[in-house]
Amino acid sequence: MKIKNLHIKEFKGLRDISINFEKNDEPLDLVVLAGSNGSGKTRILESILRYFQDHINYKQNNIEAEIFYEEKEKNCISNVRDFFYRLESFSYCEANDSLREKHIEIKNKLDILPKVIYVPTEINFQKMNVASTTLVQEYKFINIVDTNLIKDIPYYIATKMISAMLKNKNEKVGDVQKKVFNEINEIFENLSIDVKVEDISQDGRNITLFTNSSGDEFDINELSSGEKQLFLRTLAIKMLNPENSIILIDEPELSLHPKWQQRIVDVYRKIGKNNQIIIATHSPHILGSVRKENIMLLDKDDEGKIVVRTGDELYDSYGQPTDRVLKDIMGLETTRNPKVFKLLEEAGELVDKNEYESEEFKTKYKKLREILGNKDEDLLLMDMDIQIRKKRGLKNVESK
């Protein structure tokens, strides 16, 4: 299940916005929403979530979507609203032996049940004290990664390990544990991260333990804010075991080092199979890691209406340095401090007027040297320009 097109008639201030999530008539597996604050990135993620929620609750809404369905999913659909409702109520009805005809049809025809997963910006990482080894994961169609879901991660790891040990009784406990932890650590291998899942505490709490390259051991509560964002957000998605699903992630760059931001998209793409990932971001490092066909730039036209720029309208940011992405995609005038940039512009204008001997220029130039030092590229270019102008001036005098 993937989104092909989205049309927002009205939602939280967004009006009459259409977004095409396709390339060559095929839904994109990855969509990155970029734009300034207030351009609507988060609201678009929320509107997608609302579309599915309202369908489940049989509510009328102002959001329309064209969905791509796998062949097996198509065979279960007579009415879209009914299909979403059956998916959301599936686990409850199954647990209470009240599966109806449509539920039974879904159970018989779909070996993989699609999900919608929303990862918001604000997640409160509460302290984790004890982890159960008998976590029962019930299927849910709509899943929001919040505090309640995050607290299940130690349960998930502990339960996964115990389950693997029961399935592989002839193997040594240490070997089984290693396989489970390697499966988790492999998700993060391209980040060159210094922290790895290593063990589960033996004090009865079953809390996940980590180690670093120095051999220090610490539990999940002692991870840094960036490590928590990375591990807990990612493991929460993995715990949901998404396949043929839609994953909405708001600002995945939060608290992450730029090196991790450059690679975080690849981390998410390694989780599950055949998913559509839609990300909202401010990070030039993320934008520099994806192709332009995957980027949707939200901008405002002259009348203040939000418009979506895609494909050929965009500069190709893939593999480009951060300063170019900031200027060409995100519209930043300069990556310098604005005051220093203005001072450089003013000094440059004086050079253009051949007023480089004036007291005004000398004052500005001296201040720039104090701030930027002797090796700044723009100052070196200014020096060269002045030397060329001086030589031209001498030649003009000699010719006369």
Image (cartoon, rainbow, N blue to C red):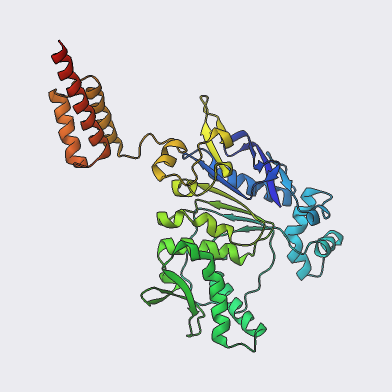
Residue at the image position 54 percent from the left and 57 percent from the top: 266
Comparing 110 with 392, the one in front is 392
The picture quadrant where one finds residue 371 is top left
Point out the image quarter for the C terminus.
Answer: top left
- Give percent across and percent down for residue 399: 16, 12
367 displayed left or right of 329: left
- Give percent across and percent down for residue 79: 82, 48
Residue at the image position 42 percent from the left and 37 percent from the top: 327
Comparing 35 with 44, the one in front is 35
Residue at the image position 53 percent from the left and 36 percent from the top: 314
- Give percent across and percent down for residue 340: 26, 36
* Residue 208 in view in this figure: no
- Give percent across and percent down for residue 17: 62, 34
356 to 151, vertically: above or below: above
Residue at the image position 27 percent from the left and 39 percent from the top: 377
294 displayed left or right of 67: left
71 displayed left or right of 343: right
123 to 347, vertically: above or below: below
129 to 323, vertically: above or below: below
